[in-house]
C-alpha cells in the first residue's frame, strides 16, 4: 500500500505545482484570480472497523479560485475600467453570456463597446436623466456609441461686418477697342476683385458648405466710370468708327460690389428672382466712411451647391461696425444660424457606471449604465479563460444591479485591476509543493528498498 499511498501524494503535489505555476504564469493577466488546490485524506472505513486505521493517501478535492481584490494599475484611457469591490462586468458573444473582472474595453468598427475578446459589454437602459428604465439580466443590451447627436439646422441668416480700405484701387483694367473698361468679375481671376472672406454654412441635413464673399470696388470719390451704351435688345451701340460707345460718370461716393458664392454656386442679391448672371449686392459708403446702403437685410436667392442635400438661401445683414477707413481690409465676425449635428468628442464613465457621450456642439447624452453581476457562490463559476467565467448551477443565477448599490462595487475609470497574485507567496508555495513531491518520491523509494530487502531474504 506504500506505493499507492505515496503515488497519491505525488499526484497531489504535481497538481499543486500545476496550480501554483498557473498563478505565477498569469501574474500579468488583467483581472486574473489566483487558484488554490484543496486536498482531502483517504481512509478505509467500515461499520465494524476500529478507529485506529492508517490512511490511504490524499485526493484533490477541488481547485478553488480566490476572488479577492487585485491592485489597480492606472491608465490614460477612459474606457479602461476596474471594479472596486464585488461584482463582475457582463459581456455577451453571440448567445454566450460571460462575466469578467477585465475592464480593458474599447469601441469596435461598428461603434459597439466590447471587451478584449470582442464580446459586447452589457448595460442597463437609461432615460435622458441617466435613471435606469429596466432592471434584471433580461434587460441587458449591447451598448452602441452614437457618432452624432442633435438635429441639424439649415443656415438662413448671415450677420457680418468688415472694414474696407479707403485707398483701395479699382480692379485691374484691360484695353478693349482702344477704350479702358473694368475687368468682368471672375472669382478665379484675382485681378477682378479686391478682397474675399469666407465662413461655413450648413444645409438642412447639416452638410457644411463654404460661403465666400468677393468684394469688388466699383467706384471711388472722383473716379470716372464708363458704362457701355446698349439698345433695347441689349446689343452695344456702335459709334461712327464702328466701335462700342460708352457713357462716363464721375462718382461722389465709394461703392463696392459683394458677390456671394455658396459652395460652387453664386447667389443673386435680388431675393427669389434668379438672374443670369447673378446680381451682386452693392455697398455704398459716405465720404466719412459710414455705410449708407444697404440699410437693412438683403435676401439672396437660393442655390444648390454640389454636395448639398437641399438649396441654401441666406439673408445678409451688415452690422454697424461695417465701415470704410484708412486701414487694411479686415473682415469682422461672422454669425450664422445653421448647425450640423454634434460629432462625438469623448465617452466618460462615472463611478456609478453611467456612460455619458459628449459631442462637439457641447451637448451630452446618457447612453447606458454598466451592468454589475454578483453570485451567491462565486466559487461555483465555470472558468472560460481570458479572465472570464460562466454561471453554473453551483454558482446560482446572476444577481444584477447598478454599480455602488447593494453588494456591487464602484467603477473606477482610467484603471485596470491587476491579478491578485502575490509572487512572493506563490514562490514560497512552489518550494513547499516541490518538497512535498520530493518527500513522496522518497517514500516510494524507501518502500521499494524495503520490498527489495524482503525479496533478498527469501532468496
Image: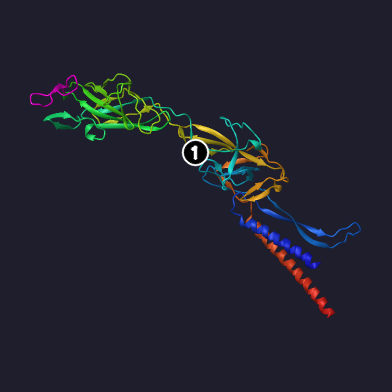
Q: Position of residue 195 (x, y in %)?
A: 26, 32
Q: Can the viewer see residue 328 in this picture?
A: no
Q: Nearer the viewer, residue 167 or 109?
A: 109
Where is mark 1, residue-wise? 346
- The residue sitting at 21% across, 34% down in the picture is 191
Q: Main secondary structure of the magenta part?
A: loop
Q: Is residue 372 visible?
A: yes
| Residue at the outermost left position | 240
Residue 239 belongs to magenta span? yes
Q: Residues within 10 Å of mark 1 (few under 14, many from 20)?
A: few
Residue at the farthest bottom position: 459
Residue placed furthest toward the right: 48
Q: Is residue 124 magenta?
A: no
Query: Could you say where residue 209 lies in the image, as x and y percent from the top left?
Result: 37, 32
Residue placed most toward the observer, 317 or 328: 317
The magenta segment is 228-250
Amino acid at each position: 500500500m506504500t506505493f499507492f499511498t505515496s503515488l497519491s501524494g505525488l499526484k497531489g503535489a504535481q497538481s499543486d505545482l500545476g496550480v501554483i505555476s498557473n498563478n505565477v504564469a498569469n501574474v500579468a493577466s488583467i483581472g486574473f484570480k489566483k487558484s488554490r488546490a484543496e486536498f482531502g485524506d483517504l481512509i478505509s472505513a467500515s461499520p465494524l472497523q476500529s478507529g485506529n486505521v492508517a490512511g490511504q493517501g490524499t485526493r484533490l478535492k477541488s481547485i478553488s479560485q480566490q476572488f479577492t481584490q487585485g491592485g489597480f494599475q492606472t491608465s490614460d484611457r477612459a474606457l479602461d475600467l476596474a471594479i472596486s469591490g464585488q461584482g463582475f462586468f457582463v459581456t455577451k458573444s453571440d448567445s454566450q453570456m460571460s462575466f469578467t473582472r477585465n475592464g480593458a474595453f474599447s469601441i469596435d468598427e461598428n461603434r459597439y463597446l466590447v471587451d478584449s475578446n470582442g464580446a459586447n459589454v452589457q448595460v442597463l437602459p437609461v432615460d435622458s436623466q441617466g435613471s435606469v428604465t429596466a432592471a434584471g439580466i433580461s434587460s441587458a443590451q449591447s451598448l452602441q456609441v452614437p457618432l452624432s447627436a442633435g438635429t441639424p439646422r439649415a443656415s438662413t441668416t448671415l450677420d457680418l461686418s468688415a472694414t474696407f480700405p479707403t485707398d483701395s484701387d479699382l480692379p485691374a483694367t484691360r484695353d478693349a477697342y482702344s477704350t479702358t473698361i473694368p475687368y468682368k468679375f471672375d472669382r478665379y481671376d484675382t485681378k477682378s476683385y479686391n478682397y474675399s472672406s469666407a465662413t461655413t454654412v450648413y444645409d438642412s441635413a447639416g452638410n457644411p458648405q463654404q460661403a465666400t464673399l468677393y468684394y469688388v470696388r466699383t467706384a471711388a470719390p472722383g473716379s470716372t466710370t464708363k458704362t457701355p451704351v446698349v439698345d433695347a435688345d441689349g446689343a452695344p451701340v456702335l459709334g461712327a468708327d464702328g466701335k462700342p460707345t460708352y457713357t462716363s460718370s464721375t462718382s461722389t461716393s465709394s461703392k463696392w460690389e459683394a458677390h456671394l458664392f455658396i459652395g460652387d454656386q453664386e447667389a443673386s442679391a435680388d431675393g427669389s428672382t434668379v438672374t443670369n448672371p447673378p446680381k451682386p449686392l452693392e455697398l455704398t459708403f459716405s465720404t466719412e466712411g459710414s455705410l449708407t446702403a444697404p440699410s437693412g437685410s438683403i435676401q439672396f436667392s437660393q442655390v444648390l451647391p454640389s454636395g448639398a442635400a437641399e438649396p441654401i438661401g441666406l439673408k445678409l445683414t451688415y452690422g454697424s461696425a461695417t465701415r470704410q477707413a484708412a486701414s487694411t481690409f479686415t473682415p469682422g465676425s461672422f454669425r450664422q444660424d445653421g448647425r450640423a449635428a454634434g460629432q462625438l468628442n469623448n465617452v466618460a464613465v462615472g463611478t456609478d457606471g453611467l456612460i455619458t457621450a459628449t459631442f462637439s456642439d457641447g451637448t451630452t447624452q446618457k447612453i447606458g449604465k454598466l451592468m454589475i453581476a454578483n453570485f451567491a457562490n462565486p466559487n461555483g463559476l465555470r472558468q472560460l479563460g481570458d479572465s472570464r467565467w460562466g454561471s453554473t448551477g453551483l454558482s446560482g443565477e446572476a444577481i444584477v444591479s447598478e454599480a455602488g448599490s447593494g453588494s456591487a462595487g464602484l467603477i473606477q475609470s482610467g484603471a485596470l485591476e491587476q491579478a491578485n497574485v502575490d509572487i512572493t507567496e506563490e514562490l514560497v508555495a512552489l518550494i513547499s509543493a516541490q518538497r512535498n513531491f520530493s518527500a513522496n518520491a522518497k517514500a516510494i523509494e524507501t518502500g521499494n528498498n524495503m520490498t527489495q530487502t524482503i525479496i533478498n531474504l527469501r532468496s
